[in-house]
Image (cartoon, rainbow, N blue to C red):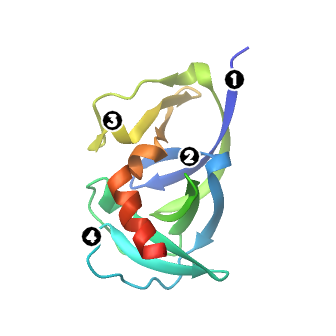
Amino acid sequence: MAEEIKVIVFKLGHEEYGIEVDKVRTIERMAPITRVPKTPPFVKGVMNLRGVVIPVIDLRGRFGLPETEPTDDSRIVIVAVNDLEVGFIVDSANDVLDVSEDAIDNPPEVVGGIKAKYLRGVAKIGEDRLLILMNLSEVLNRSEIIQLEQIEG
């Protein structure tokens, strides 16, 4: 029997993405974000979440997709990677799925304009639904984590 992983499903544009539930701390509505100078354009700044300052990244910008204005459906998904909490701005987040490890294929070189290194794989859900699984350690690669830690610290 194949292992199953639980993933939070979120959308960027028309594509659905997944992050393992155990890496997601919380999903928040859009909140005020304070800009931080000298950060990459996709780093939107920091937010105060219950007294904790958390760097916020626009995932569209991170992946080189066109950025859009937040809507009522926009969410900030707070993830924890290597003792660092980071918020990802996504178009919407509204589902939790169990994905069988057997259903996950290696990602093609580019999916929807996103380089494969940011992706863990593509999972087939049912007959016609594809879920793009994030590789969080690459999305927050070393050099960016150092920048974000400086923001936090």
Q: How many marks?
A: 4
**Which amino acid lies under the numbered mark 1 shown in the image of this protein?**
Glu
Label 3 Cα crowd, 10 Å radius (few <14 / some 14-19 / many 20+): some
**Which amino acid lies under the numbered mark 2 shown in the image of this protein?**
Ile
Could you tell me which residue is drawn at 34 percent across and 37 percent down? 117
Per the model, the C-alpha gap separating discs 2 and 4 is 23 Å
Q: Which residue is mark 3?
A: 116
> Could you say where residue 58 lies in the image, as x and y percent from the top left?
39, 65
Q: Which residue is mark 4?
A: 41
Label 2 Cα crowd, 10 Å radius (few <14 / some 14-19 / many 20+): many
**Which amino acid lies under the numbered mark 4 shown in the image of this protein?**
Pro
Residues under numbered marks 3 and 1 in contact, where contact means CB atoms less than 8 Å apart:
no
Q: Nearer the viewer, residue 131 or 151?
A: 151
> Could you say where residue 29 lies in the image, as x and y percent from the top left?
59, 74
- Label 1 element class: loop
> Could you say where residue 71 lies in the image, as x and y percent from the top left?
46, 74
Residues under numbered marks 2 and 3 in contact, where contact means CB atoms less than 8 Å apart:
no
Residue 137 in the figure: left or right of residue 44:
right
| Label number found at residue 3 | 1
**Which amino acid lies under the numbered mark 3 shown in the image of this protein?**
Ala
Q: Is residue 39 above or below residue 85?
A: below
First-in-chain label (2 vs 1): 1
Per the model, the C-alpha gap separating discs 3 and 4 is 21 Å
Residue 15 in the figure: left or right of residue 101:
left
